[in-house]
């Protein structure tokens, strides 16, 4: 049987000073963050093992968050080698291994839908381009309202704000690891493998699209567009009209890339 705790290849959990998770002296535990999670912590806490002094009453979830890691990014928690719940209150000398969320991640209990914060507008439009239900507010409505909407609408909140992802009223959430839209899209598609249905959702308001006869949308088109294009779609919510215009090739490249890499991922999981 393999030994529990640090191996000869890892530093001792007792090396270095201890961090205080609760503001008072209490039981000292030893925490190992998975490599994928260490960047959330300050540099001094990114060692293979970190000694943490708890207050004796805080839960394991609170301790992990005190290290800077949102629980939305945490998978299994192992205490002395055995799986434990976030509600576990750690005792003196326990070793805690914090593992990352398993990908692809299943979100039980509701159709997979997203809610994005104000800083992720480009990602929202790209998800909608692929037919993914992605709600987004172009104005900053505040963290409490976003978390409340996540709970009320049962949407996975996507954000790069760690504080927002720690709000207790949140239904489900995920940290967006990159600030580049191409990488953000691959991250979310790879993590959640949503069903893709390109060109079926309005990129402006998230409403469903329907085919539109040219004559029914003629008054909404400029003269050059009426003369050049014959195939149109219209949003059933905001009435916006779509056609294959000058930017279609760029959008088609985004769709083709996503479908080529992730189009069959959800089917493979069912």
Image (spheres, grey):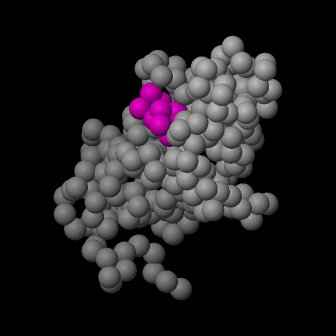
Q: Nearer the viewer, residue 269 or 73?
A: 269
The residue stretch that appears in magenta: 116-124
Q: Position of residue 56 (x, y in %)?
A: 39, 45
Q: Relative to 107, say whether 135 is above or below.
A: above
Q: Position of residue 86 (x, y in %)?
A: 53, 48
Q: Relative to 170, say whether 98 is above or below.
A: below
Residue drawn at the location 46% of the way across and 51% of the way down:
182
Q: Position of residue 3 (x, y in %)?
A: 45, 81
Q: Is residue 51 visible?
A: no
Q: Nearer the viewer, residue 233 or 85?
A: 233
Residue 119 is inside the magenta segment: yes
**How many numbered callouts?**
0
Image-quadrant location for residue 265: bottom right
Residue drawn at the location 28% of the way across and 73% of the way down:
12
| Left or right, residue 70 beside residue 214 | left
Q: Is residue 196 visible?
A: yes
Q: Nearer the viewer, residue 103 or 129?
A: 129
Q: Which quadrant of the figure contains the C terminus?
A: bottom right
Residue drawn at the location 51% of the way across and 53% of the way down:
187
């Amino acid at each position: 049987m393999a030994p529990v705790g640090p191996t000869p290849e890892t530093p001792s959990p007792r090396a270095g000073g201890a961090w205080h998770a609760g503001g008072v002296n209490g039981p000292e535990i030893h925490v190992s963050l998975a490599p994928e999670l260490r960047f959330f912590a300050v540099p001094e806490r990114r060692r293979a093992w970190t000694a943490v002094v708890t207050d004796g009453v805080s839960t394991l979830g609170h301790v992990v968050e005190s290290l800077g890691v949102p629980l939305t990014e945490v998978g299994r928690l192992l205490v002395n080698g055995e799986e434990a719940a976030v509600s576990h209150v750690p005792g003196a000398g326990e070793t805690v291994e914090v593992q990352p969320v398993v990908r692809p991640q299943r979100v039980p209990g509701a159709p997979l839908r997203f809610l994005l914060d104000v800083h992720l507008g480009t990602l929202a439009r790209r998800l909608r381009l692929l037919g993914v239900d992605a709600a987004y507010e172009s104005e900053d409505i505040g963290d409490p309202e976003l978390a409340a909407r996540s709970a009320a609408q049962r949407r996975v909140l996507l954000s790069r704000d760690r504080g927002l992802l720690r709000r207790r009223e949140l239904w489900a959430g995920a940290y967006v690891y990159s600030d580049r839209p191409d990488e953000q899209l691959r991250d979310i598609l790879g993590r959640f493998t949503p069903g893709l249905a390109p060109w079926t959702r309005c990129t402006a308001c998230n409403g469903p699209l329907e085919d539109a006869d040219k004559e029914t949308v003629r008054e909404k088109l400029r003269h050059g567009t009426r003369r050049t294009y014959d195939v149109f779609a219209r949003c059933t919510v905001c009435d916006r009209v779509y056609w294959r215009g000058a930017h279609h090739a760029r959008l088609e490249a985004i769709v083709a890339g996503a479908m080529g890499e992730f189009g069959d991922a959800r089917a493979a999981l069912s």
